[in-house]
Image (spheres, rainbow, N blue to C red):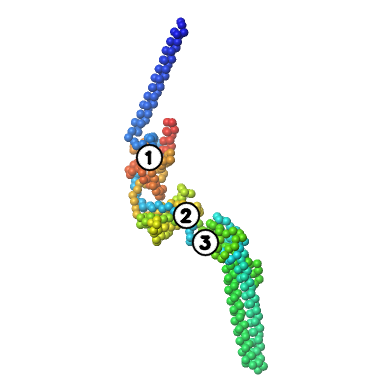
Amino acid sequence: MNAHARLIPAALLCLSLLACSKSDSGSAKGSDQQASSKKGDSKSGEPDSMGGSSDAVKIQAADQQKAGISIAPVETATVPQLLTLNGQVVPNDQRTSHVGVIADGRITALNVLPGAVVHRGQTLGEVHSHSVHETVGALLQAFAAVDRAKGAVTFATQARDRYAKLYGIQAASLEEKQKSEQDLLQAKQSLSDAEASVHMEREHLSELLQVAPESLNANNLYNRELVPIRSPIDGIVLTRSLTVGQVVNTGDEAFLISDLSTVWVTASANEKDISLLHNGAAADVTTQGFPDLAFTGRVGQIGSELDPQTRTIPVRIVLPNPAQRLRPGMFAAAHITGSATRTAVFIPEDALQNINGNQIVFLTADGVTFRPQVVKLGTHSMGRAEIVQGLKPGDRIVVKGSFMVKGELLKGTVGDS
């Protein structure tokens, strides 16, 4: 047998194997297509709610009961009309203090930085002041004048008593007796004037030093040239405007301090929305810093004048801030409960799940087959979420145990892949 003859059986064998391989591949492909067709047939007529995926999961009633899954129809509710305003967190002016310097001089000490918690009466800094030095000198002179006046009164009293006795024994004239009495009156008047001067200078110095007037006397006035800068309230230092060594004038602002246990949110409402606003209206405020928290407050003031340029009116919202999470400068969105009402679809927030970045609920028509439905959310209130797109009244959804349904759905997806 020549070489050509030996190649013919080998070629026939290869062709036979190739044909078998193609036949097996076609059978497998046909089986996959048939299975896919059956899978699609099981959900025919259901909308594609997950961007091309029409996956559904079946959970029998007994299994639903074990998993704590509950189904309920979607209902509408009448709720107040909400007005959302963008604004900013600012300090409560009624609990904020601009702490200024009360005497000319030079800053010798600053004891706190922005962010520090301070208490009423706490010394925040000190100013060396020549004005205090001059006031101390004036008060010392007034104390000395009182001492001299007291001595003069004592001397005049003794003189009057002596002339009264001499006049009684006709050893002094009436004119001398009357003059001694007049001298005593003048001495007492001088003492009264000196004491008034002490009172005035002491009050002035006590204001500068921020101490009780009665604590100032002639023995403790030396080295009293430092004027304290004290906090008038409990709060947090928001700003510090001065530096050590800086020369200051009376009234220069040193610190801005605010009690942040309550804050304001200032916003602006459009002219067309004014009718929805009223003082005392409830407001839920959200911030980027705490996206999962809603801070509840009330409208404290609605402006009395419209801005002619923007056609808006200022709105102030007062917020309790006991944990002091809200900080001045934060951007905020205020959802204000208006006086009007509207009808909307609401579902329990527990019905919502997140799949691939979408908010979804699980719809069911027969009570055992569940498919994910993408929804668009509106407002949130009292554990309920408003649905603005994706559901209609009467739709039956999972209201409890949606997480278990999600788990079963994702389990099937992983298995298919």
Task: Name the foreground residue: 310 vs 315.
Answer: 310
Q: How far apart are marks 3 and 1 (CA)?
A: 54 Å
* Residue 414 position in % (x across, y down): 44, 33
Q: How far apart are marks 3 and 2 (CA)?
A: 17 Å
Q: Distance between the residues labelled 1 and 2?
A: 37 Å
- Label 3 or label 1, whichever lies nearer to me, is 3
Q: In which quarter of the image is residue 18?
A: top left
Image side of residue 258 versus residue 284, left or right: right
Is residue 274 visible in this depiction of the protein? yes
Residue farthest to the top, as pictured:
1
Residue farthest to the front, as pictured:
309
Neighbor class of circle 2 (other Cα within 10 Å; few <14, some 14-19, many 20+) is: many
* Residue 229 position in % (x across, y down): 58, 63
Q: Give me the residue at 59% from left, 79% from top.
A: 192
Q: Which of marks 1 and 2 is nearer the N terminus?
A: 2
Q: Which amino acid does label 2 sit on?
A: Val
| 1 to 242, vertically: above or below | above
Is residue 294 visible in this depiction of the protein? no
